[in-house]
Image: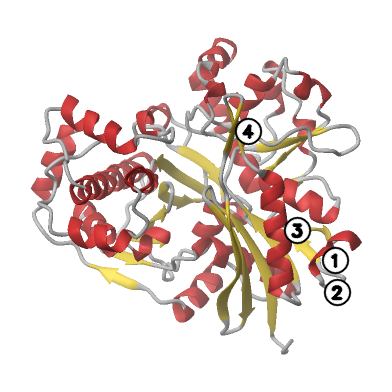
């Protein structure tokens, strides 16, 4: 491998698919190539929705074999879900998917011991029914939980199988609702009040820490020649994606990480733990270099993905082209409404929401698609406006990264709704953030400013200027307020 560049494998696990990407990083080099992609399909067994974690792990091994010789491996994934290990380090069943119903009503139980406002001050995390805290409370009393000696979040579980090392990376730990956002350590006093042992998670790791080397059995399974270190990256995929926002030096920016979810917010130096932030359901999650990701979770392109599954449509481009011809803001829904969280019959639920609010009910797929994209743009607008107000942090530009940055209609609608220019790209932000953090132990990539400069020089970006009448967006927002 040439001097000044390194080749790394970025394992990027999403809620619908996983992939292993080969990245090259150097002074003026940042490239990505997909080595292997594999599906991620939750499986319902006896009424419980599980992740098929062994299939995911096999996909990782297959991807590392396809990647060929690499200098490092890093893993990022979705947040909150975990696997339980027994005293021998053996997995106690497939991890439960965050969309499972087992946490219904658990938050209300927790609030009896720790009121919601105290919980927010202690952790800075938004209320979401699937937070790890609520999952652990729901699991208590089961034989499986009684046998557990270790709990590993998904990227840490994959890392454990690759290296044998136990630990929890801090950006993902922050999503558990058990981490103190100021000290960036476990909120042990809170955990004790709730009867949770934070020792289950093992020691905290920082992005760029070395986890360990690939085990001999893994080297054999992948055909790699050791030693190959596994490097802790910003293992929550949103943290990796925010690390890859190509902001210019001194730019005041907001970001939207788009995909199954839309995560819209700001990068701050300190958490915002006010009652106003709690009531607005903003979360304070850890980012790289001590930063805070102050953001709101929005249902995202999950709405469209589920509609397409219901319709039996696989190609999104004709839908987007047809949606562009549908009148704007005819019908909109609250994209953050929990009614849209579960899978199945999404178009029916959107139709019901429009009917209940006295708006025209979409009939054709193109009309549903336009409703979804208009609604997401409105949700992006609301989140970015509120984030600025709550944090006292004005912005001049919105960066859209992730898969949704390829959706030109969504990007333009977001610019129109926000009244701000939108810079779209990179689409592979999570994988690029993963690669850049892996470069740090080799002296490559640099600090955040250097990383973002490299991204701006090497990745294709598209700028969208706002257009149209802002009053029409205000009127549409009032319909779902």
Q: Earlier in the sequence, mark 3 or mark 2?
A: 3
- Picture coordinates of residue 255 (x, y %)? 40, 56
User: Residue under circle 1?
Assistant: 219
- Picture coordinates of residue 100 (x, y %)? 54, 29
Q: Earlier in the sequence, mark 3 or mark 1?
A: 3
Q: Which quadrant holds the C terminus?
A: top left
Assign a secondary structure to mark 4. Answer: loop
Neighbourhood count class around disc 3 (C-alpha, 10 Å): few under 14, some 14–19, many 20 upward: some
Query: CA gap, disc 3 to disc 1?
Result: 21 Å
- Picture coordinates of residue 469 (x, y %)? 8, 54
Quarter occupied by residue 240: bottom right
Left or right of 277 on screen, residue 349: left
Nearer the observer: mark 3 or 1; the answer is 1
Q: Report the disc number at residue 96.
A: 4
Left or right of 211 on screen, residue 154: left
Query: CA gap, disc 4 to disc 3?
Result: 28 Å
Assign a secondary structure to mark 3. Answer: loop
User: Residue under circle 2?
Assistant: 225
Image point 87% across, 66% down: which residue? Answer: 220
Nearer the observer: mark 3 or 2; the answer is 2
Left or right of 365 on screen, residue 434: right
Image point 13% across, 59% down: which residue? Answer: 325
The one nearer the camera, 440 or 57, is 57
Query: CA gap, disc 4 to disc 1?
Result: 29 Å
Badge 1 vs badge 2, beta-carbon distance below 8 Å: yes
Query: CA gap, disc 3 to disc 2?
Result: 21 Å
Quarter occupied by residue 315: bottom left
Q: Is residue 327 visible?
A: yes
Q: Earlier in the sequence, mark 4 or mark 3?
A: 4
């Amino acid at each position: 491998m040439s001097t000044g560049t390194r080749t790394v494998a970025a394992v990027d696990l999403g809620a619908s698919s996983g992939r292993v990407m080969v990245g090259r990083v150097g002074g003026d080099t940042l490239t990505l190539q997909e080595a292997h992609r594999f599906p991620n399909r939750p499986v319902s067994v006896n009424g419980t929705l599980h992740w098929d974690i062994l299939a995911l792990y096999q996909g990782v091994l297959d991807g590392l074999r396809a990647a060929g010789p690499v200098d490092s491996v890093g893993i990022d994934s979705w947040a909150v879900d975990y696997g339980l290990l027994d005293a021998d380090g053996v997995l106690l069943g497939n991890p439960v998917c965050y969309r499972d119903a087992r946490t219904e009503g658990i938050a209300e139980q927790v609030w009896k011991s720790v009121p919601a406002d105290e919980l927010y001050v202690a952790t800075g995390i938004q209320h979401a029914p699937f937070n790890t805290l609520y999952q652990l409370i729901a699991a208590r009393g089961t034989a499986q939980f009684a046998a557990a000696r270790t709990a590993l979040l998904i990227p840490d579980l994959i890392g454990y199988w690759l290296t044998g090392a136990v630990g929890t990376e801090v950006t993902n730990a922050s999503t558990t609702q058990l981490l103190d956002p100021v000290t960036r350590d476990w909120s042990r006093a809170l955990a004790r009040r709730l009867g949770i042992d934070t020792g289950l998670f093992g020691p905290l790791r920082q992005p760029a820490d070395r986890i360990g080397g690939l085990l001999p059995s893994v080297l054999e399974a992948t055909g790699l020649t050791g030693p190959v270190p596994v490097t802790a990256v910003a293992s929550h995929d949103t943290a990796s994606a925010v690390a890859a926002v190509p902001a210019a030096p001194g730019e005041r920016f907001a970001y939207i990480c788009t995909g199954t979810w839309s995560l819209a917010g700001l990068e701050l130096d300190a958490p915002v733990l006010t009652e106003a932030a709690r009531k607005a359901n903003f979360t304070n999650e850890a980012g790289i270099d001590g930063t805070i990701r102050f953001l709101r979770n929005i249902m995202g392109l999950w709405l469209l993905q589920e509609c397409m599954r219901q319709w039996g449509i696989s190609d999104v481009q004709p839908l987007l082209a047809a949606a562009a011809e549908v009148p704007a803001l005819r019908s909109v829904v609250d994209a953050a409404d929990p009614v849209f969280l579960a899978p199945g019959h999404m178009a029916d639920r959107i139709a019901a929401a429009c009917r209940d609010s006295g708006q025209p009910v979409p009939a054709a797929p193109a009309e549903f698609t336009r409703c979804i994209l208009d609604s997401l743009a409105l949700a992006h607008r609301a989140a970015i406006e509120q984030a600025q107000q709550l944090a006292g942090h004005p912005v001049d530009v919105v960066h859209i990264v992730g898969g949704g940055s390829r959706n030109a209609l969504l990007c333009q609608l977001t610019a129109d709704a926000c009244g701000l220019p939108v810079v779209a790209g990179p689409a592979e932000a999570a994988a690029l953030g993963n690669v850049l953090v892996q470069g740090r132990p080799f002296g490559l990539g640099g600090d955040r400013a250097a990383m973002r400069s490299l991204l701006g020089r090497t990745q294709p970006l598209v700028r969208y200027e706002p257009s149209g009448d802002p009053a029409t967006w205000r009127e549409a927002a009032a319909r779902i307020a």
